[in-house]
Image (cartoon, rainbow, N blue to C red):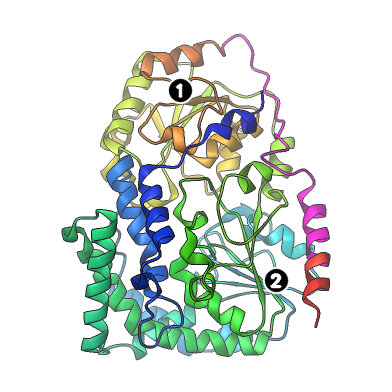
Amino acid sequence: MSEAENGASLRRTSAMQRIIDLEDAAPKELFEVLPGSTVPFWAQVRMQMAWMLSEESTGSVAVATDSWTRRGELERLAKAFLPNRWDATQRARRHDVLFFVGGGTLASRAGGARNWLVDTFAEQTNDPLVIQRRPLPGPLGAPSFRPTLSTEGITARARLWARGGVVPPETIAAIDRLLAFFAEQLGVPSAQLGPLRKRVLRTEVHRPYEIAALRRVVQRVRPRLVLMDTAAYTYNAETVGVFKDAGAYVAEPQHGWIGPSHAAYNYGRAFQDPALRRALPDELLTFGTFWSNGVNLPAKKTAIGKPHLDELARSAPSLRPRRVLVISSRANPEETDRFVEDLREIVDPEWSIVFRAHPGELAAVEDRYPRIAARSNVEIDRNPDVYDSLAACRAVVGVASTVLFEAAAFGCEVIARENEFSASIIGDAFGPRVLTVEQAAERIRALDADGIMAGAPDPDLWTPEPADAYRRWLDERLAQIGG
């Protein structure tokens, strides 16, 4: 039985159900729009409220990061106001197809930093433009696909212009009233609202400048079709609205795990209303039919595959070293820290034990996983591309992550750990979930007899020939859009 068939048992968490129930009830507060906004306030805070509930019910622990420095801010401003070959405001021109991405889905390849999420699609598109939010060039070098531009200058200038700005008292009162209402309806303790309120107020000051600048860029590009990652994350609703106001069709390419418990891809009845529907993309492009069937999004869903996986999984070496990759899902870091330490103690020394943190934890690995960090016989994997790591290991251990499904495509033995939310994220896709470190070790020992690994992506999870599927989709959509 395939991973897709086994994973069909995925369940919606109680936290997700609370949000769906609220949206099905559709109280008037869900539709209130703050002054200066074009989408209801509920859309702007929905994901953050969902994360609060998720942390409460799954043990997922957020990472507190603050990398701001005065020197860094001055450098950002200098780059923002000087001629810059990467600045979207300065360099954007007319393109029918625009890829608007975060810029974090990168792999180091010859020729620079390759955006594994969209670069293959961009290469199949006639004269596209890629714009990313993160600065360029990035830590892996200049982008390999050109033209690629950045909105980092917009962000830096908006922060300067917003200095000293204040949110009107009546808007603050509306924010406080609505946050209190949402928290009460969802069972979120009011004491947890402080960080969200602070973020909302900061966004209210910056957003007018950022949106005005983005509108000017979009007026120059005049895209007919926009492929935007995280477009269904409704805190991006105003950005999605800018593209829709320009007459563009907005599609989101899937970037990671989606399923019945992911708040960005499951919505209640309220989002059928045009006011909230404005916050969402017109279409979701998924890795495969398994992912399309697992979400409840009021948008068209089309399975087109994942080019990066399709290419690398099929070319992965069949002979692998005795190497186990343990991946984090940010859930219960203390428990994972102990698990890896104990696994290292009882597994034969001939096996390498490698730990890979969730991307959101990279800046705090030593603090969150002190036992792992202190052990010289446990390697911490910092490879930018997890696929390079999967191609070099024989077993992958984890709680709940897209990486487990990807590991199976690479031919790795997947050992799923039991956790409060593994049933809702991976279901029974990889057989019985291990309850103890010893059970995981037994699965690893059983691999000693055979070092041959065969990568074979499940077609329900990973649509074959994704570049061809994308070209067919693109031709069809551009013909439908017209212009």
Of 418 and 450, nearer the camera is: 418
Judging depth in this view, the residue of 20 and 42 nearest the camera is: 20
Query: Which numbered circle lies on residue 190?
Result: none
Is residue 219 left or right of 348 when viewed as pictured? right
Q: Which residue is mark 2?
A: 146
Q: Is residue 429 left or right of residue 318?
A: left
Determine whether, in the image, residue 411 is placed left or right of residue 385. right
Q: Quadrant of residue 320?
A: top right
What residue is at 51 percent from the left and 34 percent from the top? 426
The answer to whether residue 432 is seen in the rendering is yes
Specify the quadrant of the image occupied by residue 176.
bottom left
Amino acid of disc 2: Arg
Magenta span of residues: 447-475
- x and y, in percent, of residue 289 in the image: 68, 44
Picture quadrant where residue 407 is located: top right
In the image, residue 473 lies in the stretch drawn in magenta: yes
Q: Which residue is mark 1?
A: 433
| Residue name at image x 57 percent, y 63 percent | 229
Above/below status of 374 relative to 12: above
Give coordinates of residue 112: x percent, y percent: 64, 60
